[in-house]
C-alpha cells in the first residue's frame, strides 16, 4: 500500500492536505507519482470562496472529477507525473513515462491507461500542466471560427485568456485587442503581440467603448458577469460574443434592452467538455488533444508561471490568488519526494 497526500477544499477559504492510503493498482491500472499540478485561478477560486452552484456536477465527462460541488472536495484537473507501476495487463512500455492527466491535486493517483496522455519529449512536465487550459483555448477559438480580417477583442487575460490570445495571434486578423484589470496580465498580453492591451476605466478603454468601430468577434473570459455588458457594447451588428467564463453563483444585471434587441448579436456558450455539434462529425477529443500538444509546443506557456509552491504550502498559494490576484498568473504546486 502506498501513502499519498491530497489537497481538499474543506470550507470557504480553507484547504488542507490529507494523508490517504492508495491501494495497489489493478491488473489494468497504472500508478503515477505527480511531479507538478496547475492551480486554476478561475474554477478553483470559485470553490475556495464557495461560489459554486450546489446542484451542478463537478464534471460530467472526466471520470476522476465526477461528483458534486460540496465540501470536503478534492479538485483540480492538471497533473503531470511519472509512471511508477503498471499492472500485469498493461503494456510495460508505460513504465517511467511522463504523463498528463485530468486529476485533482494529489501526490499519487491510479488511472486506466486510456486516461493518461504521454508528454512529448519536447515539453517539460510544467509545460504539460497547461494542457487542460490550452484545450479550453482551442475549444474557444474553434467555437468562434475567426474570419480573415476580423476585428477581435478578448476580455480577460488570465491563463485561458492569454492562451486564447496567443492562438488568435496566429490568424490574419485586422486587429486583436485584449482587456484586463491587472497590469501584469496586460504586459504578458502585449508580449504575445496584441494590437492593444487595455485596462478598464483607462481613457483608451473608454474610447473603445464609445467608438463606432465595433468588433466582429468578442470573447468574454474575465470570470466577471458584469463584464458581459462591456462585451456587448463593443460588438458590431450581427457579431459574435463567445462566453467562456464560468461565473458560478456570481450575478450581475445584463443590459439586454436598447441596442442589443436590434443588434442580432450572437451569444455563444463555449465549454470544453464537448465538441461543437457542427464539428463533431469530423472532430473528436483525440483529434483536439493532438492540436493541443502542437499548440503547447508553439506557445510555450511556461513563461507565465509566476509562483511555485510545494503541496505542503498550498494554503499560501490559495491565499495569494484570493488576496493578491494581480501578482499572479499561473501558480504551480510541486511534489518533491
Image (cartoon, helix red, strand yellow):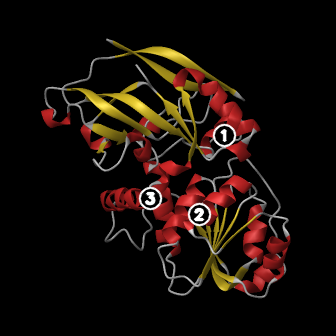
Residue beneath label 3, please?
274
- Provide the secondary structure element on which disc 3 rests: loop
Disc number placed over residue 45 in the picture, else none: 1
Q: Position of residue 336 (x, y in %)?
A: 43, 23
Answer few, some or many: residues within 10 Å of disc 3's Cα (few below 14, many 20 plus, some between 14 and 19). few
Disc number placed over residue 191 in the picture, else none: 2
Side (left or right) of 86 relative to 144: left
The residue drawn where x is 72% and y is 84% is 214
The residue drawn where x is 42% and y is 43% is 62
Front-lying residue, 248 or 146? 146
Determine whether 42 is above or below 157 in the image: above
The answer to which of marks 3 and 1 sits earlier in the sequence is: 1
Side (left or right) of 171 relative to 203: left
- Provide the secondary structure element on which disc 1 rests: helix
Q: Quadrant of the C terminus?
A: top left
Whether residues under marks 2 and 1 lie with C-beta atoms below 8 angstroms apart, the answer is no
What's the distance in space between the residues labelled 3 and 1, CA to CA? 23 Å
Front-lying residue, 30 or 165? 165
Q: Position of residue 247 (x, y in %)?
A: 68, 52
Q: Position of residue 211 (x, y in %)?
A: 80, 84
Answer few, some or many: residues within 10 Å of disc 1's Cα (few below 14, many 20 plus, some between 14 and 19). some
What's the distance in space between the residues labelled 3 and 2, CA to CA? 31 Å
- Total numbered labels: 3
Determine whether 31 is above or below 305 in the image: above
Front-lying residue, 188 or 93? 188
Amino acid at each position: 500500500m502506498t501513502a499519498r497526500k491530497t489537497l481538499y477544499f474543506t470550507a470557504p477559504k480553507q484547504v488542507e492536505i490529507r494523508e490517504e492510503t492508495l491501494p495497489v493498482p489493478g491488473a489494468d491500472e497504472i500508478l503515477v507519482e505527480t511531479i507538478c499540478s496547475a492551480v486554476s485561478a478561475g474554477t478553483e477560486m470559485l470553490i475556495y470562496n464557495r461560489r459554486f452552484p450546489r446542484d451542478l456536477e463537478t464534471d460530467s465527462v472526466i471520470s476522476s472529477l465526477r461528483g458534486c460541488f460540496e465540501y470536503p472536495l478534492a479538485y483540480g484537473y492538471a497533473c503531470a507525473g511519472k509512471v511508477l507501476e503498471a499492472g500485469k495487463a498493461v503494456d510495460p512500455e508505460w513504465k517511467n513515462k511522463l504523463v498528463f492527466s485530468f486529476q485533482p491535486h494529489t501526490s499519487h493517483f491510479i488511472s486506466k491507461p486510456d486516461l493518461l496522455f504521454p508528454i512529448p519529449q519536447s515539453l517539460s512536465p510544467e509545460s504539460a500542466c497547461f494542457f487542460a487550459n490550452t484545450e479550453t483555448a482551442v475549444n474557444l477559438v474553434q467555437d468562434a471560427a475567426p474570419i480573415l480580417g476580423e476585428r477581435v477583442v478578448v476580455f480577460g487575460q488570465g491563463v485561458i485568456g492569454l492562451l486564447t490570445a496567443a492562438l488568435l495571434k496566429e490568424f490574419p486578423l485586422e486587429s486583436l485587442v485584449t482587456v484586463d484589470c491587472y497590469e501584469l496580465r496586460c504586459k504578458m498580453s502585449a508580449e504575445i503581440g496584441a494590437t492593444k492591451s487595455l485596462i478598464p476605466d483607462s481613457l483608451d478603454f473608454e474610447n473603445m467603448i464609445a467608438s463606432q468601430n465595433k468588433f466582429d468577434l468578442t470573447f468574454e473570459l474575465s470570470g466577471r458577469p458584469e463584464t458581459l455588458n462591456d462585451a456587448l457594447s463593443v460588438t458590431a451588428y450581427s457579431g459574435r460574443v463567445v462566453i467562456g467564463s464560468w461565473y458560478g453563483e456570481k450575478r450581475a444585471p445584463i443590459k439586454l434592452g436598447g441596442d442589443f434587441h436590434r443588434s442580432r448579436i450572437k451569444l455563444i456558450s463555449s465549454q470544453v467538455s464537448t465538441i461543437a455539434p457542427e464539428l463533431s462529425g469530423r472532430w473528436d477529443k483525440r483529434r483536439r488533444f493532438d492540436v493541443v500538444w502542437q499548440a503547447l509546443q508553439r506557445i510555450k506557456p511556461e513563461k507565465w508561471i509566476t509562483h511555485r509552491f510545494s503541496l505542503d504550502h498550498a494554503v499560501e498559494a490559495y491565499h495569494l490568488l484570493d488576496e493578491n490576484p494581480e501578482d499572479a498568473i499561473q501558480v504551480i504546486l510541486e511534489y518533491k519526494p
